Amino acid sequence: MDIEKYIASGILELYIAGALSAEENLEVQHYALQYPEIQKEIEAIEEAMLQLTKSTSPELSDTSFKKVLSRLDDTIPFLPATSEKRIPWASYVGWAASLLLIIGMTWLYLQNNDLKSEIELTNKENEDLQQTITKTQNTIVEKEALLQELRNKNVTVVALGGQKVAPTSFAKAYWNKNKGQVIIDSQGLPTPPAGYTYQIWSLTLDPLTPTSLGLLDNFDTDTSKMFTLPNTNDSQAFGITLEPEGGSPTPTMEQLYVLGTVGP
Amino acid sequence: MNLDDLIQQFQQKDKIAFEKLYTMYAENICGVINTIIQNPERAEELCQDVFVKIWEKSDSYNPTKGRFFTWILNIARNTAIDELRSKTHKNQKKNLHVHSLVGIFEKGEDLNSKVDTIGIQTLLKGLKEKCMLLIDLLYYKGYTQKEVAKELNTPIGTIKTRIRSCISEIRKNMKL
C-alpha cells in the first residue's frame, strides 16, 4: 500500500478528531501498528491539536486538581478498613457444623461396621455352640442306649481277669445271647503298642476252640473304650490277645491279656 | 513511563497515575471547554467535572477504539456543549459567536500566556476562516465526517484533504 497517499488522504486527522466510523478506526490502528511512519504521523497531528487546545486554556488555580481529587473520594465506593471487617460468624458456624456432621457420620459408620462384624462373630460362636450341644446330645443318646443294653435282663456279665503278660489288666464282656451281641468294656487294658491291636476271642472249652469276634479298632481314639461286636457262638469263655495289626487267624496265647469264663 | 502503561495504571484506579494524566491534559481539556463556552471561570469548573467523569468512566476507555486524547476530547466537548444548551448559560451569554474558534482568534489576543505555550495567534496565523470552521466542527463540536460533509455541502473526500492541509498549516506555524 501507498503509505504517503494514505497519510495525505486526511484520514489520520479525522482519526484524532474521533470523526471516523468504528471500522475506519480499526483500519487506522491496524496500519499504525504495521507502519511506523503512520504511527509517527498520528502523534504529530495529535501534538498539533494538543498545542491548539492548550492555547485557549484559562489560567488554572493551583488547587484545581485537589478539587477534582476531593470529589473522587465521594464517588469511589467506601471500603471498610480490614480491622473493622465483620467476622462472618454465621458462615463459620455453618462450616463448623458441616464438619462436625461429617465427623459424626463417619464415626457412626465405623461403629456400625464394628457392630456388624461382632454380630457375625457371635453368630459363628452360636453355631459352634449349637454343634457342640448337638454332639453332646448325640453322645448322651448313645450312652443312654449303651446303658440300656448293659441293663438288659438277658445280658450275662463276664469278668475277664489279667493273665501272665498283663496281670493288672481287666475287662468285662456284656453278652446278650438272644441278640447275638457282646459289648466289651476294655477300660482296664493298656494302650496297645504301635503296629498291634487287641483281638477278641470266643472260646468253647472241650475241646478248646477259639473263634475270632473281631478287633478293637481305634482303641486310642475311642474314649469310652466300649466296643459292640456280634457273637452268635455258644461261648463258654472270652479272651483278649494282642495281635499284629489286622488280627490273626488263631490267638497268640503268649499275648493273652485277659480271660474270663461264662458262669453257669 | 510510556503513556500506555500510565493509562493502564489509571484504569486500575491508581490516583498517582491519574494525577500525571491530569497534569498532561488539564490545559487541553480546559482549553477545549473554554473555546466552546468562552467563560474562563466556568470553564475551569466544567474542566474539573470532566476529570471526575474521566475517573468514573475509566473502564469505558478502550485503546482499540482510538487515542486516549480523542476519548477525553469527546468527554470535554460533550460537557461543554451540554453547558451551552443549559438555561443558565443562555441567560448569561447571548452574543456568543457561533464558530467559537474563529471568535477567539478574532479577539486578537493569546489566552494562555504560559512560557511553554504557543499562542493561538501564532498557531492560527494565515489560516483561512474555512479552515478554522472545519477544525471547529470536527474537533470542538464533534461532528462526524458525514455530518460535516452535509453541513458544508462538500464531498467527504474534499473535507478530508482540506482538514489535512489545515492541520499542516498549524504544524508549520508551530515551528515558527
Image (cartoon, coloured by chain):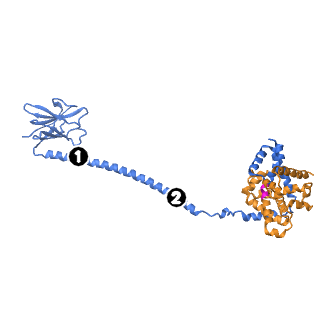
Chain colours: A blue, B orange
Magenta-tinted stretch: B70-74
For label 2, count other residues whose C-alpha is less than 10 Å away and answer few (under 14), some (14-19) or many (20+).
few
Q: Which residue in the structure is indicated by mark 1? A: A139
| Residue B116 in view | no
The residue depicted at 26 percent of the width and 33 percent of the height is A194
Q: Main secondary structure of the magenta part?
A: helix
The residue depicted at 75 percent of the width and 59 percent of the height is B55
Choose top left, top right, bottom left or bottom right for residue B36. Answer: bottom right
> Quick one: A79 or A97, which is closer to the camera?
A79
In three-dimensional space, the C-alpha distance between marks 2 and 1, rounded to whole angstroms, equals 61 Å
Q: Is residue A126 left or right of residue A56?
A: left
> Quick one: A126 or B35, which is closer to the camera?
B35
Residue type at the position of mark 1: Thr
Q: Position of residue B103 (x, y in %)?
A: 88, 61
Front position among marks 2 and 1:
2
Check the image and report above or below for B24 versus A164. Answer: below
Choose top left, top right, bottom left or bottom right for residue B52. Answer: bottom right
Q: Which residue in the structure is indicated by mark 2? A: A98
Q: Position of residue B88 (x, y in %)?
A: 80, 69
For label 1, count other residues whose C-alpha is less than 10 Å away and answer few (under 14), some (14-19) or many (20+).
few
Q: Secondary structure at mark 2?
A: helix
Q: Is residue B78 left or right of residue A131?
A: right
